[in-house]
Image (cartoon, rainbow, N blue to C red):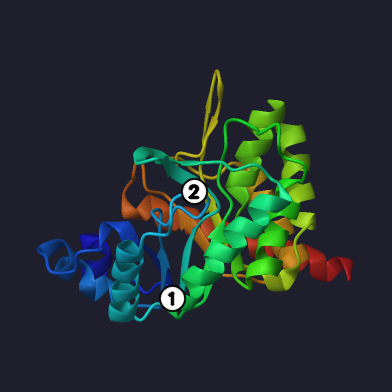
Amino acid sequence: MDELIERDIQLPWMEVLADNFLCVDNLHFYRAEPLFASCPLSLHCIGMNLGAMEPLDESYLQSVKQLADRLDVQQISDHACFHSLEGAHSHDLLPVAYHPDNIRYIAERADCVQTFLGRPFCVENISTYLFHRQSILSEGQFLAGLAELSGCGILLDVNNLYVNGLNAHNDEDAALDYALQQIAELKSEQVWQIHIAGHQRTRWGAIDHHGAALHKDVLYLLAEAIRLLGKKPVLLEWDNNIPPLRRVLEELNTVEQTLTDFACLQGEAL
């Protein structure tokens, strides 16, 4: 953060993790304010608990709204998941079953959130390491249904789709096919943002840890998502094992070059 401010690097936009800045009356916030003022912002949350049985936390939403107003953000987002039950918090994003009942439930809550915040609101797909027997829809159908019923947008994380494919099939080709199938279920107007990140393979599964360079298949999925859904704001997440800023900017250049090369190939084909 200090290096971005000192070098006055101009970025097209940034995402702010709301839960790190819900209290604005401290040195941490004031230190970051010059960076917040340097480009358009999107606000990303991890505490709305959209899929939980508990009522929405109005005090949390009020804090998010105050922060959004203070920073004048363009959009706000959270996840299609839950993280608590009967007062016990997992401190993780836990999956819900891909079922029409959950579409209706989460869509209603997301619509309430969007109305309360008074700004465009996106729901993001999460990475998952287990799969519900009650799921009768595909992940893509579930996300499309949420967008259609709620009027909110989708924050499409293509790395999460790939991780889910790896955890379901333990094979890179099958994971790629899985992710492409989910993207094909979505409409262009439903997807408002795209996330990409690095992940980690372990002996028991893949983890969306945001702590490594992008896998080549994730870059391919990004290009395919842009081809199918149109140009969208793309965010590179790298918030574990954080390298020097120079390395992050190199990764951004790789993303931009991949999309440019893909666009040229599409133009030649046309």
At 72% from the left and 60% from the top, the residue drawn is 145
| Residue where numbered disc 2 is placed | 53
Quarter of the picture containing the N terminus is bottom left
Tell me where residue 143 appears, x and y as whole percent.
67, 56
Mark 2 or mark 1: whose residue is earlier in sequence = 2
Q: Is residue 171 visible?
A: no
Left or right placement of residue 270 versus residue 55 in this view: right
| Vertical side of 262 occupied by 97: above or below | above
Which residue is more in the foreground, 40 or 140? 140
Number of numbered discs overlaid on the protein picture: 2
Label 2 SS: loop
Which residue is more in the foreground, 111 or 215? 111
List the single residue furthest toward the right.
Answer: 270
| Vertical side of 112 occupied by 2: above or below | above
Q: Quadrant of residue 156?
A: bottom right
Select label 2 or label 1 by which is in front: 2
List the single residue furthest toward the top.
Answer: 203
Quarter of the picture containing the C terminus is bottom right
Which residue is more in the foreground, 97 or 217? 97
- Give amino acid for label 2: Met
At 16% from the left and 67% from the top, the residue drawn is 31
- Give amino acid for label 1: Phe
At 64% from the left and 45% from the top, the residue drawn is 161
Tell me where residue 194 appears, x and y as whole percent.
58, 61
| Residue where numbered disc 1 is placed | 116
Q: Quadrant of residue 25?
A: bottom left
Give the CA distance from mark 2 to mark 1: 19 Å
For mark 1, does the 10 Å Cα neighbourhood hold few (<14), some (14 to 19), or many (20 or more) residues?
Answer: few
Tell me where residue 17 appears, x and y as whole percent.
35, 59
Label 1 SS: helix
Q: Quadrant of residue 65?
A: bottom left
Q: Which mark is residue 31?
A: none
